[in-house]
Amino acid sequence: MEIRVIRSGGFVGGLPQRFSLSAEQLGERERAELSELVRAAETSVPAEPGGLAPDSFRYEVSVVQHAGEKTFAAADTDSPAVRRLAQWIIARAPRAP
């Protein structure tokens, strides 16, 4: 499984930041934690994303698995589970080009 995150918005706005992390880079414990975060995020994506509050981030998350790729997006305030997953990936992944 590979997770890609594009983070945009925030206090200074600017260019979107891209991050990518492969589950193969993680130990068994972190892979299990990642799987739980992905499941929680996938089930909490709002049907209609809300407006972007001032200074908040918007996350676009792509989950690539053998069965295919799923992409979902949410703002900071739309889905705490998506925000947790994105922040978890950002904390562990180098920025992607």
Image (spheres, grey):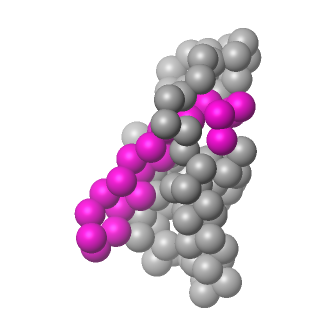
The front one of 89 and 67 is: 67
In percent of width and height, residue 79 lies at: 66, 41
Residue at 60%, 17% in the rendered image: 51
Residue at 65%, 34% in the rendered image: 78
Residue 52 shown left or right of residue 65 in the figure: right
Residue 79 seen in the current view:
yes
- Tally of numbered tags: 0
Residue 86 seen in the current view:
no
Residue 75 shown left or right of residue 67 in the figure: right
Residue 68 inside the magenta-drawn segment: yes
The front one of 70 and 4 is: 70
The front one of 28 and 50 is: 50
Give the residue at the far bottom of this rendering. Answer: 28
- The magenta region covers 58-79
Is the residue 95 above or below the residue 20 in the image? Answer: above
Residue 71 shown left or right of residue 44 in the figure: left
Assign the C terminus to one quadrant of the image. top left
In percent of width and height, residue 2 lies at: 42, 64
Give the residue at the far front of this rendering. Answer: 47
On the image, which quarter does residue 37 sit in? bottom right
Residue at 35%, 61% in the rendered image: 64
Residue 82 inside the magenta-drawn segment: no
Residue at 27%, 70% in the rendered image: 67
The front one of 54 and 12 is: 54
The main secondary structure of the magenta stretch is strand
Is the residue 97 above or below the residue 9 in the image? Answer: below
Is the residue 47 above or below the residue 44 in the image? Answer: above
In percent of width and height, residue 72 lies at: 44, 43
Assign the N terminus to one quadrant of the image. bottom left
In percent of width and height, residue 55 lies at: 73, 17
